[in-house]
Amino acid sequence: MKLAARVGQVAPSLTLAIAAKAKAMKAEGIDICSFSAGEPDFDTPAHIKAAAKQALDAGKTKYGPAAGEPKLREAIARKLKKDNGLDYAPENVVVTNGGKHSLYNLIMALLDPGEEVIIPAPYWLSYPEMVKLADGVPVIIHATAESNYKITPAQLREAITPKTRLFILNSPSNPTGMVYTPDEIRALAEVVVEKDILVVSDEIYEKIIYAGVEHLSIGSIGKEIFDRTIISSGFAKAYSMTGWRLGYLAGPLDLIKAVTTLQSHSTSNVCTFAQYGAIAALEESQDCVEEMRQAFAERRQVMYELLTAIPGLKCPKPDGAFYLLPNISKTGLKSLEFCDGLLESQQVAVIPGIAFGADDCIRLSYATDMATIEKGMSRLEAFVRAQI
Ligand code: PMP
Ligand code: GLU
């Protein structure tokens, strides 16, 4: 069948595809260790589920406003003020079907054909594909392991052209786990203001950061950068709500209205009773977030130690999120070959770095239990030893 050119130029999400394959193999009874999807293994906290059940029983089963339940928009605005020092009114917030949908809608509402979006690599794999779907041009700037996978302000400045509309900042980062320091964020903000472009700050991992690290939300630095910032976030990672499909955007009013118009003709409101779970997530105790963060911290330590003890694998220690991105070039294999071989011979699922613009790396998620981490690392070691 003839399909639109726009879908022909994008690849399906490799993270979702490999994670689904690993789940299917597990269901067949295969003893597989999966470090594929960035999906917390915890159940959604009970009080969040209870709030959604209560809303369901109370008849919150109808269409709602396309921009989201007013109470949830208020709760998000309060959260952004309290946690991030950002002054948004509820009207500046739109509730979306997840962080992915937030970014997709933002890019759709913003870009005209040929306009450029700056994306630091290694990047989360959906960013360039979304830009292409909007007939925009992804402009990739490369960060290396030596610079802790962070770009410099000079790199950002050099990449900006008269066609640049947007810079995508993702700290803590998927897939590198790196977190920009407050000073580094300030220096990037200066370039954004000086060159008068927009920045979307994807802060979906803001709560998953480790010892001594601080998350600074770029828009909180001052009025000039605030006016040029859009926040994209969601509930999936911090509250273990991946399947709920709940996210949000906050930003300038005309942009939020445009995204709402787009949603009013595409998805309409996010599942009404699910939004009541999100209200509970934000407004009730945050102990669950801290408990999960501590579990991730322990897993990071164990996985990092086991992995960096494997001869031939090199990896900077991440400060946030739940990923390791080791370099595999000593094995002589490219990332796809490596991942296929590892799955085939050791039943270990990881994501090839090529999906993130880093073909000499693989990505492992440690959002899984400790026993799987220990077993998986010894299988990984056996595979790597057989290559070198
Ligand atoms: N941004 C980043 C950096 C991510 O890793 C993800 C992945 N899950 C998302 C956005 C989207 O998350 P969701 O749509 O599940 O809320
Ligand atoms: N973002 C997660 C990941 O990188 C989930 C998969 C996806 O949404 O593509 O693994």
Image (cartoon, rainbow, N blue to C red):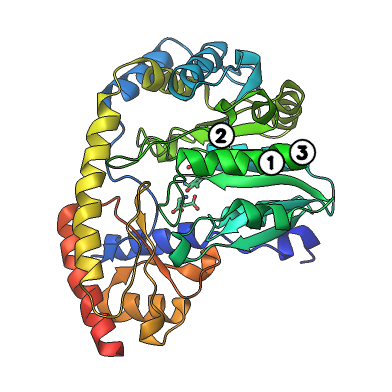
The three-letter code of the residue at mark 2 reads: Ile
Disc 2 under 8 Å from ligand 1? The reply is no
Q: Crowding near pointer 2: few (<14 within 10 Å), some, many (20+)? A: many
Task: Measure how far apart labels 3 and 2 are at the Cα level.
Answer: 15 Å
Residue where numbered disc 3 is placed: 196
Secondary structure state at the residue bearing disc 1: helix
Residue where numbered disc 2 is placed: 218
Q: Is residue 169 left or right of residue 318?
A: right
Q: Is residue 86 left or right of residue 139?
A: left
What is the count of numbered marks? 3
Q: Crowding near pointer 1: few (<14 within 10 Å), some, many (20+)? A: many
Q: Position of residue 343 (x, y in %)?
A: 33, 75
Q: Mark 3 and mark 1 in contact (Cβ < 8 Å)?
A: no
Residue drawn at point x = 84 percent, y = 54 percent: 114
Q: Residue 352, located in which quarter of the rendered image?
A: bottom left
The three-letter code of the residue at mark 3 reads: Asp
Location of residue 4 with respect to 230 vertically, above or below:
below
Sequence-first tag of 1 and 2:
1
Location of residue 254 with respect to 120 vertically, above or below:
above
The three-letter code of the residue at mark 1 reads: Val
Q: Position of residue 75 (x, y in %)?
A: 48, 15
Quarter of the rendering occupied by the N terminus: bottom right
Q: Mark 2 and mark 1 in contact (Cβ < 8 Å)?
A: yes
Q: Between residue 58 and residue 41, name the one nearer to us.
A: 41
Residue 30 visible in the snapshot: no
Q: Position of residue 201 (x, y in %)?
A: 57, 38
Name the disc covering residue 165, or none: none
Q: Between residue 323 and residue 31, name the one nearer to us.
A: 323
Residue drawn at point x = 60 percent, y = 17 percent: 88
Residue drawn at point x = 84 percent, y = 46 percent: 112
